Image: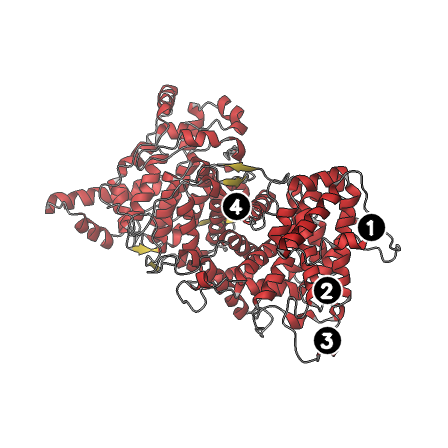
Amino acid sequence: MGNADTKLNFRKAVVQLTSKTQVIDASDDIFWDQFWSENVTNVQDIFTLIPAPEIRVLREEAPSNLATLCYKAVEKLVKAVDSSCRTQREHQIVLNCCRLLTRLLPYIFEDPDWKGFFWSSLPGKDDEESLPLAHSLLNALCDLLFCPDFTVAANRKSGPDKADELQSIDSCEYIWEAGVGFAYSPPRYPILDSNRTELLKLLLTCFSETMYNPPMDLSITPNRWIEHLTSSENRHALPMFTSLLNTVCAYDPVGYGVPYNHLLFTDSLEPLVDVALQILIVTLDHDTTGGIPMEEGAVGDNLFINYLSRIHRDEDFQFVLKGITRLLNNPLMQTYLPNSTKKVHFHQELLVFFWKMCDYNKKFLYYVLKSSDVLEVLVPILYHLNDSRADQSRVGLMHIGVFILLLLSGERNFGVRLNKPYTATVPMDIPVFTGTHADLLVTVFHKIITTGHQRLQPLFDCLLTILVNVSPYLKTLSMVASTKLLHLLEAFSTPWFLFSAPTNHHLVFFLLEIFNNIIQYQFDGNSNLVYTIIRKRQVFHALANLPSDCNTIAKSLSKRQRRHMPASTSNENVSETAMEGSHPAQPAEPGTLKASLLETPGIENMTEKESAHPLSPSVSIDINKLITNRSERESKTEDIAEESMNATKNSVVPKGGIRVAEQASNNNINNVNQWVPSSDWVYQWKSKLPLQTIMRLLQVLVPQVEKICIDKGLTDESEILKFLQHGTLVGLLPVPHPILIRRYQANPGTTAWFRTYMWGVIYLRNVEPPIWYDTDVKLFEIQRV
């Protein structure tokens, strides 16, 4: 019963606080102490006992009480540091102050009138010692994160009487976990994990001020909370960064692999890893240099980014990569006993972290690509892409997966690694095939394009760019993958699709470039693809003879009512059984919450063309003549917030067809409605289609294959494949074109997209307690599917 009484007292204190008439004296300690005394023992109680409407009433009607409550709570934390926070009672007070501030801060951030509150100093201090309230809070939190017996295990070298003063402690001796830059693995105590988690939740809440502003340029308006924590003013910056990084990368959710152990014991570590990873990506995202590359050896303002970029030892890279791949592959693990192993849910944050790591530390990127380890990143990404393709609430996950593959595909080694044979360990609803990781990539991309929901259409360019980048290195494609690539060409080259938007023909250019790269550079091992090209030769002839007169254009567009691409006829010779144990991709449950996203830049703004032959500088100029200039492209990105109605309308697609978004999406309604394809326009790009290599191949091989079929009465494709395997086109094809790689280039659009996406994920994943739920965020909108 006593517990109910103390909650009642707490509730009375809250009610008293919000009564409009009464300004409560700051020196009335008996009153204020009720908020952090032992009355309340968990964060859920605080969220229940202080409902959101009352915090808003407090802010509007009794602002001085809210101000006093906040600065009193910060003052308590500062005093706990001064006394080195050694007693059980002090621990409880610190935790309750943290819970209280976690509850209140979002409501302070949502009101512009309170913007300056934490940046003024405590009342009654002299100017010399007047730190802004925010700095006092952050400094106290950082000290408390390395507090012996509270958040770290005490080094028992000194007796209790000689215990270190918290303010002078060397936190480098108390790093939380072995790994980068620290070899000693301290003993684990669940209570320490849980205390760290509560302090870090408050830290994350401080950083979340970003959510209450529209997207902004950090070099002009930085987040002052993150700026202070990652600057040299924070004496714990290095041990803190190392603790967060090592805690995440050392985490093994399965542990000794005892089945169902996660149901028997609560894992105190997962919530800690969760919030540590979120703090890590939020701090690493805070790059105030405005994307200007730093000189070698220069130290930027953000020490976390600086430390991350300076990791260089192979064993450190191995530790980080092993951690990332272990955790990325964890949700995919198959066991014979259903639900017997623990599955983690922070794959989206892990992908953001992997992206940041590759972005800021090029040596890490090259390390990842040096061995087949990169495939341990590729397979989970493809799994998530395939699994999320029908789910509107996971558009962001689709984008980040594709962005990472685009970044990797800019490096030759990635293409080479894809030739490793693929053994299916993860059931995916894709056709069964025998082949390499390249076949897996092609098959999943085909599935996304043909059966994903229409909001993914802006990603088609990106998906095909990835395939173009890797194509010169693909030694042998399976029959399944070859058929899929030709089906895409067949679908994208139908006249009505080519004529229905100003940039659709770019997709055909990308596909032809893929075929040309493989024929010119990897002809020998690719008899499946060559055979499929011969079988589907009418597609190339139709493209070469695409009519460009006004009548035909008008006639093709009148068929637009069908709005779906022709169902594939390419499936005749390939069995389409999906993998055993796989489930079809499901749309989001109605009512699922999702955060809106910014538009992504067009592929021409995300990539820069580079020759893969560094010795021939004139290359890129010739290539540009071959490929239509992509800069005139209108942004095809649909307005994410306003277009969900069309999605349900067009959600039924014939098998093998390709869903295409209504071109008149709200944000470019004018461009497209005024745009009418003309004969000149068609002729302009049609004359640049790079068909020479394929036409020459058909000219040489088709008569030979036909002759064999007639002479030997062959109807069996395996004989034809055998002939093609031993054939050669040496000296018969045009001079090989130079290989052109489109490398990802950092750009403001993608940076802003990442920031919005990351905070949207953090908002939606923090439900226990629901820190930001129903507050007035400005960075994105929360919508229901």
Q: Quadrant of residue 711?
A: top left
Residue to which mark 2 is pinned: 235
Q: Which residue is mark 1?
A: 26
Who comes first in sequence, dot 1 or dot 3? 1
Q: Secondary structure at mark 3?
A: loop
Across the whole image, how many numbered discs are drawn on residues? 4
Looking at the rendered structure, which numbered label has been put on residue 163?
3
- Viewer-nearest of discs 4 and 2: 2
Secondary element at tag 1:
loop
Residues packed near mark 3 inside 10 Å, few (<14), some (14 to 19) or many (20 plus): some
| Image: 560 above or below 716 | above
From the viewer's perspective, is 575 left or right of 124?
left
How far across and down, in percent of the image, does residue 261 sit? 43, 64
CA distance for labels 1 and 3: 33 Å
Q: State the separation of the CA atoms marked 2 and 3.
A: 20 Å
Picture quarter containing residue 566?
A: top left
Q: How is the image coloured?
A: secondary structure
Label 4 vs 1, first from the N-terminus = 1
Tag 4 residue: 607
Q: Amino acid at mark 1?
A: Ala
Looking at this view, is 26 or 561 the one in front? 26
Q: Earlier in the sequence, mark 4 or mark 3?
A: 3
In percent of the image, x 37 and y 47: which residue is there? Answer: 444
Residue visible at 61% across and 66% down?
Answer: 192
